[in-house]
Structure formats: structure tokens, C-alpha cells
Image (spheres, rainbow, N blue to C red):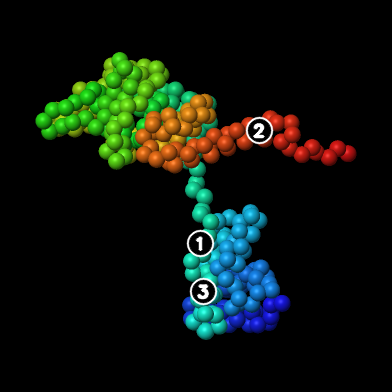
Amino acid sequence: MTDKPYTAGFISRYLDMLAGQRQLSDHTLEGYRRDLKELSAMAEPLTLPEIRPADLRRFITRLHAGGLSPRSISRKLSAWRGFFLWLLEENIITANPAEDIHAPRKDKPLPKALPVDEAVRLVATVTGDDDDTPDSKSRALCDHAMFELLYSSGLRVSELAGLDIHAVRQPGYISAGWIDLDEKEVTVTGKGNKTRTVPVGDAAINAIRNWLTVRPTSDTESDIRHAHALFLNSRRRRMSPRLIQSRLNEHARRLGLPVHVHPHVLRHSFASHLLQSSGDLRAVQELLGHASIASTQVYTALDFQHLASVYDATHPRAHKKKNTP
């Protein structure tokens, strides 16, 4: 059996060293104490010099199987690694068994997607300032067209801002992206300077046509970067990604949506809703312009979350029966 006083003594000496040399807080030291006592308990009947990397991997697997988060496991492993390093420096062990041990990967946060009804309400509702001026109406039509197109085609905000009213290729300027209303498609240049063409839905096409009836002619003809821009701000210059984000967030707040909405939320919603309907991961990858299918696979988790919530809410065997008196 493990000599508990032997191990506890080294733990106490190590914590005393941390308190004296590193001046850690009592709260931090107590956390280290708990983590090291747990290590001692799991290691029985092994003594400290007998612990090997395979043993630590087994301990981590046990913690992971018990539901401990990767973040918490990483914290414990950090405490163990420091303890073994000190034991090595004190010539109590001959090698640090935790040196090449890694905690489970921390789960990446899933992208946030709106429910279908909220996404549709967000892009379909036209809002504007309280006044009824032509400028207010023009801004409302511009916002409506931008938001419909973001959700319709899953564009990045930078891709949306870079769109021209048609393809332009002339000395000094080549379009990075453009809209083709007749073909109902948009061509954009995304990450890695890769060009892709994505379909555009009828709702977005109609919203863009309405915007084009009031879109002002750019008064910056000397600057070709703005002359052909599909979306213009109040100064008749190309809309910036930052302004698009600000307008979308303001629009969402006016509608009373309970979450912070930015352009990438509509891109996530586009991907999630399309995958829920079609189940075609490769098609979604192409539409999003992902170089790797791994980037798109995160939406399968969103799809599973949706299915799981439906199951929990509707399946007669999803919940335990309540005890009746």
C-alpha cells in the first residue's frame, strides 16, 4: 500500500515552497492541495517514484469519463506536472511522468445560430428611423437587402461589403465580388483568395431590386472603389463591414431579439438551417467556401442539438415519469 504520510509529507513541503517562493494565495494553494490529494488517492497502491505516464493517462481517462470538463482536467494536470517537476529537482523521482501528458482538447464553442422563425423575422422585417424621410426609407431598403442577402447566401460580412452591382474589370480595378440578379447568384472572393458563386433566393433578389431603385449614384466617381459598390453608406461610399455589423445589431435590438446578433450569426444560421433541411454536408461546405470539410462539420453538432431538443420535448420516453401520490 502507498505510504500516505510519506506522500502527504511531500505534498505539504511542495505547498510550503509555493507559498514561500511564489507567494500564491490561500485559495490557489487549497486548489493545489485538493488536486494533489486526488492524485495520491488515484495512484494507490503506487508510490510517487512508481507512477508512470501510462498511469497518469489512466487517471485522466477516469476523470474524463466521470464528466469532468477538459478545462478542469487541464488545471489538475498542470498542478500534477508542477509537483512532479519539484520532486525531480529534489531527487525523489528520476523522471517527470507528466512531462508529455496532455489534457483532452477543450471543446470549441459551437457557433450560435438563430431558430428558423427568428432568422426569418430578422431579415424579412423592414425597420427604419422614426421619421419618414427619403433618407430613412433608403436606409431601411439598404439594410433589408443586406440582411436578406447575408442569410440567403451565407456570406461573410467582408464578402458582402465587397460586392459590386455587376462584374467590373478595367485598368486599376477588378471586382472582388458582384451580384447577378438575372442569374440569381452572387460571386465573392473569400478566404485564401478563393472565388465561389452562391445562389441567391427570391426574397433577397426582390429586396436588392427594391434597394437599387433608390440607391444613389456615387459622388466619388474619381475613386473607383466606391463607384460600383452595391451597398453605399450615407456618404455614398462603399459600406464597411463595421457599419454593416452595427446596423444589423441595431435592427435586431429594435425587433427585441434576446441575443446579440452580428453578421456571422446569419452565416451560421444559413449553414445550420440548410444542413437540417438537406443533410448534405458537402454542399454546405461548397456554399460556405470552407477549404476543409472539418470546418463545416461543426454544424453537424448544431444539427444534433436541434434534433436532441426536439426529442427531449416530444418523445414520450425522453423523460422519467413523475411520481404520482
Instruction: Report the amino acid beneath label 3.
Output: Asn
Could you tell whether 239 is left or right of 1 in the image?
left
Task: Look at the numbered disc 1 and give the secondary structure of its residue.
Answer: loop
Disc 2: which residue = 311
Which label number is shown at residue 102? 1
Task: Look at the numbered disc 3 and give the secondary structure of its residue.
Answer: loop
| N-terminal label among 3 and 1 | 3
Q: Does the CB distance between marks 1 and 2 fall below 8 Å?
A: no
Residue 130 drawn at (x, y percent): 39, 26
Between residue 231 and residue 99, name the one nearer to us.
99
Q: CA distance from mark 1 to mark 2?
A: 35 Å
Q: CA distance from mark 3 to mark 2?
A: 47 Å
Residue at the location (52% across, 80% down)? 94
Split into 4 quadrants, where in the image is the C terminus?
Answer: top right
Residue at the location (41% across, 37% down)? 264
| N-terminal label among 1 and 2 | 1
Packing grade of label 1 (10 A; few <14, some 14-19, many >=20) is: some
Could you tell whether 314 is left or right of 11 in the image?
right
Instruction: Report the amino acid beneath label 2.
Output: Tyr
Between residue 28 and residue 86, name the one nearer to us.
86
